[in-house]
Amino acid sequence: MDVRCLCFDCTDFDTFIDSRTTSELAQRGDAKSKRTDLRVVGLALLVSTDFHIPLFSRVYPGNQPDSVTFGSVTEELIERYRLLAKNLEHVTLVFDKGNNSEENLQALVPSRYHVVGSLVPTQHQDLLEVPLDRFQSFEDPCLEGVIAFRTSKKVFGREWTIVVTRSQELLDGQLRGIAQVLRKRRRALSELQWKLKRSQERGAKGKGYTL
């Protein structure tokens, strides 16, 4: 098994446990399923990119933020590094922006993990303003349609290599999603307009809508 690249992520699972439960794990939180009426249990998982084999797991209360969870397992992740890197020059740990904090990144320094993370775009307006003519394409066929701009920037108290990417495929998907939401909203507005008009007609039942 190739463990040179590992992925860490947090998720949660809906439960149908009674609301009166004394469980410390099943809590109402920011559920991925958007089911705010259910209690959820969190799961943190470290897997290999090679065959997606789980190498570490932790369950945690469903109302606990991802960054707090990541901070609580840093020592265990470092211990896993020592076990996995005996015959390797380096191991790269990949995680998303939900785990970001200056404390978490600083805690990984002694581990010798190489780190790949992500940033919240709206928090880095200077990077969003880089013109597309400064982006470059890739020779790798797996990255066809993706262009990127590479620079460096101080983030979370350290200087990092920053890669800003633009994917036409991702953009097309986002635009389709926006169009779908717009169609639903316009349909809802049309229905409301029809109800308003009907309520003002002579003989309409019930109290008509006011302006």
Image (spheres, rainbow, N blue to C red):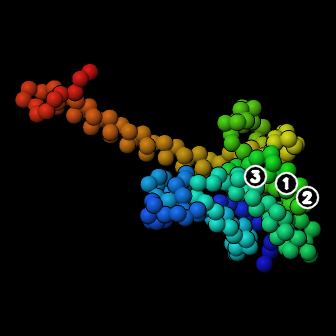
* Tag shown at residue 117: 3
Vertical placement of 118 versus 57: above or below? Answer: above
Q: Is residue 50 visible?
A: no
Q: Which residue is mark 2?
A: 110
Disc number at residue 83? Answer: none
Considering every residue shown, the one lying at the far left of the view is 203
Q: Nearer the viewer, mark 1 or mark 3?
A: 1
Q: Check disc 3 and report its element: helix, strand or loop.
A: loop
Mark found first going from the N terminus, 3 or 2: 2
Question: Quick one: label 3, few (<14), some, or many (20+) residues within 10 Å?
Answer: some
Query: Circle 1 is placed at which residue position?
Result: 107
Please determine whether, in this image, residue 25 is positioned above or below residue 163: below
The quarter of the image holding the N terminus is bottom right
Residue 143 falls in which quadrant of the image? bottom right
Q: Is residue 74 left or right of residue 199?
A: right
**Who comes first in sequence, dot 1 or dot 3?**
1
What residue is rendered at 68% in x and 60% in y?
A: 9
Estimate the x, y position of residue 104 in percent, counting from the top left: 79, 52
The reply to whether callout 2 and callout 1 are in contact (CB within 8 Å) is: yes
Q: Residue at x 85, y 41 (%)?
A: 157
Residue drawn 64% across and 62% down? 60
